Amino acid sequence: MSLHHKSQKTLEALFAHPISMNIEYSKVVHMFEELGAEVEETKKNHLKVKLNGHEMTFAHPHHKNVDDKNQVVAIRDFLKDCGISPE
């Protein structure tokens, strides 16, 4: 898996400890697209992501950043389930 620099930095931020609270939502979406995921906006203002046989739906953040620790952890766990890590 080879990502562009910005997407790689986003992936690293999602796996960072302590949990990063300033990850731009648009960069997360772009990273998913670059990983080959099917990304769909739902009618309920959610994002549905399908990647490597797994599916996740999450709400748009209220601001431009993903600023909910639980959501960052959920995205991280989803990526792990899909076999994706920053290494």
Image: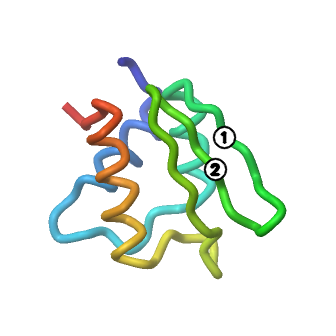
The C terminus lies in quadrant: top left
Vertical arrangement, residue 59 with respect to residue 31, above or below: below
Relative to 4, 79 lies left or right: left
Residue 54, which numbered label?
A: none
Q: Quadrant of residue 19?
A: bottom left
How far apart marks 2 and 1 lie (CA) works out to: 6 Å
Name the amino acid type tagged 1.
Answer: Val
Give whichever of 83, 24 is nearer the camera. Answer: 83
Residue 81 percent location from the top left of the image: 30, 40
Give whichever of 57, 30 is nearer the camera. Answer: 57
Q: Give the total number of marks visible in the rendering.
A: 2
Relative to 45, 33 lies left or right: left
- CA neighbours of label 1 inside 10 A, class few (<14), some (14 to 19), many (20+): some
Residue at the extreme top of the image, as rendered: 1
Residue 8 percent location from the top left of the image: 38, 37
Q: Going 51% across and 43% down the picture, which residue do you hit?
A: 55
Q: Going 32% across and 53% down the picture, which residue do you hit?
A: 76
Q: Secondary structure at mark 1?
A: strand
Relative to 65, 52 lies left or right: left
Q: Which residue is mark 1?
A: 39
For the residues labelled 2 and 1, say whether their Cβ atoms are less than 8 Å apart. yes
- CA neighbours of label 2 inside 10 A, class few (<14), some (14 to 19), many (20+): some
Q: Secondary structure at mark 2?
A: strand
Residue 48, which numbered label?
A: 2
